[in-house]
């Protein structure tokens, strides 16, 4: 650590971002995002491909320099003190980065050497983490013999080997089946409890975002919402009720005149929102003058929040091409 490097303190947020921007020529991938993250928090960064998630995480991990704005990780400025930031963080990238010709143990020992860990410290930490994620008995096997889920667990161990204060997870379970994804998250949350690490998660999987203490929704380089899961869902105006009636048009009029509810109609189904839908529903069913053929109520999901804020579903948006890739192709053609 250099003499002019400020020490990390517990009085400041573990991650602090202020008006952070990243531009590629005329294309602005990240457009002035600001947020702070506290110790031990799971912070979800939610958005489709091309929204600015990976660009933001790359700036925080010091892989690319911001065009403007400021960011610090563990009290260290990402531009002025990148080596201190890197020593403070662990990263699990979207793409696999393990050497598959090496064994799990060899991959981990190389990582420990890169971070200046002693052989004894690596051995102790490796046994602890590999046991936790149920890979200790496979430590001498080459990584190429591992399943996809085992590789992701090993990458998680590697990211935590040097005891970072912040763990960045960039689409950590992309392409894995739901059962394996859940298993990996069981390990992640157990490690968070054991080590009080802060987790910065980028994802477009709604079920993964549900593990977050707070969620930021980013779209086209802007943060369009940032709050706890419950507050984001409550901001939609209530629970979602769907019903079918023998006379859909008349049912819609009854909802409007009798209850002041404006319902959307699609394929004979009426959809509307009411606060505390589970409490509202029994009285409605008793009093509604028309025969209902079906009715259901549910809490809003993050899918609903995203749709309300962006006008599209994240599953559809996730298939869109990354605008940064389009910009790079245009640059190559212009040469």
Image (cartoon, rainbow, N blue to C red):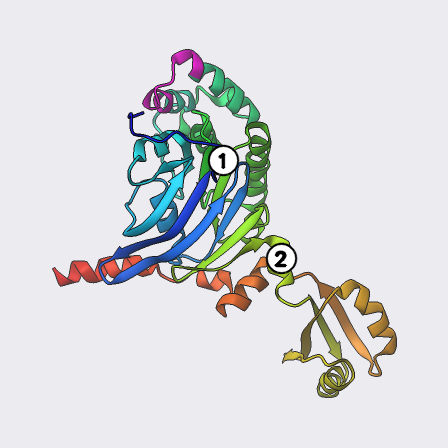
Q: Could you tell me which quadrant the C terminus lies in?
A: bottom left
User: Dominant secondary structure of the magenta stretch?
Assistant: helix
Q: Quadrant of residue 260?
A: bottom right
Residue carrying label 1: 11
Marker disc for residue 310: none
Marker disc for residue 231: 2
Any part of residue 313 in sight: yes
Residue 63 within the segment the image draws in magenta: no
| Residue 32 in picture, x, y percent from top left | 37, 57
Residue 113 within the segment the image draws in magenta: yes
Query: Taking 240 as reference, is 247 above or below it?
Result: below
Residue in view at x 28 percent, y 45 percent: 65
Residue at the outermost right position: 286
Residue 58 vs residue 153, the one in the foreground: 58
Q: Does residue 111 appear left or right of residue 156 in this picture? A: left
Callout 1 crowding tier (Cα within 10 Å): few <14, some 14–19, many ≥20: few
Q: Does residue 291 appear left or right of residue 250 in this picture? A: right
Q: Over which residues does the magenta segment extend?
A: 110-121
| Residue 173 in picture, x, y percent from top left | 49, 43
Contact flag, marks 2 and 1 (Cβ < 8 Å):
no
Residue at the outermost top position: 120
Residue 128 vs residue 27, the one in the foreground: 27
Query: Taking 231 as reference, is 149 above or below it?
Result: above
Gap in angstroms between the C-alphas marked 2 and 1: 26 Å
Count up the numbered dots: 2
Residue in view at x 34 percent, y 19 percent: 116
Ranked by sequence position, the earlier of labels 2 and 1 is: 1
Query: Taking 265 as reference, is 45 above or below it?
Result: above
Residue in view at x 43 percent, y 22 percent: 141
Callout 2 crowding tier (Cα within 10 Å): few <14, some 14–19, many ≥20: few
Q: Does residue 211 appear left or right of residue 118 in this picture? A: right
């Amino acid at each position: 650590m250099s003499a002019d490097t400020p020490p990390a303190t517990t009085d400041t947020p573990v991650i602090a971002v202020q008006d952070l921007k990243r531009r590629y020529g005329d294309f602005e991938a990240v457009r002035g995002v600001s947020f702070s993250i506290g110790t031990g928090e799971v912070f979800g960064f939610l958005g489709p491909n091309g929204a600015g998630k990976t660009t933001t995480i790359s700036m925080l991990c010091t892989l690319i320099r911001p065009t403007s704005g400021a960011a610090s990780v563990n009290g260290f400025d990402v531009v002025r003190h990148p080596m201190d930031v890197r020593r403070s963080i662990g990263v699990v990238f979207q793409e696999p980065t393990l050497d598959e010709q090496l064994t799990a143990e060899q991959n981990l020992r190389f990582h420990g050497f890169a971070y200046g860990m002693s052989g004894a410290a690596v051995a102790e930490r490796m046994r602890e983490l590999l046991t936790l994620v149920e890979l200790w008995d496979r430590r001498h096997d080459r990584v190429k013999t591992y399943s996809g889920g085992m590789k992701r667990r090993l990458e998680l161990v590697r990211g935590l080997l040097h005891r970072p204060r912040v763990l960045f997870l960039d689409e950590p379970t992309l392409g894995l089946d739901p059962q394996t994804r859940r298993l990996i998250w069981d390990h992640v949350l157990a490690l968070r409890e054991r080590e009080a690490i802060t987790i910065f998660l980028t994802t477009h999987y709604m079920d993964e975002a549900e593990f977050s203490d707070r969620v930021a929704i980013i779209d086209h380089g802007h943060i369009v919402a940032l709050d706890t899961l419950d507050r984001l869902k409550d901001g939609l105006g209530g629970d979602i009720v769907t019903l079918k009636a023998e006379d859909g048009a008349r049912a819609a009029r009854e909802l409007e005149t009798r209850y002041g509810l404006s319902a959307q109609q699609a394929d004979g189904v009426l959809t509307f929102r009411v606060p505390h839908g589970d409490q509202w529903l029994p009285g409605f069913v008793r009093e509604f003058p028309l025969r209902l053929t079906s009715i259901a109520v549910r809490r809003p999901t993050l899918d609903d929040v995203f749709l309300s804020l962006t006008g599209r579903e994240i599953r559809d948006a996730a298939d869109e091409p990354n605008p940064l890739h389009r910009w790079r192709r245009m640059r190559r053609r212009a040469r």
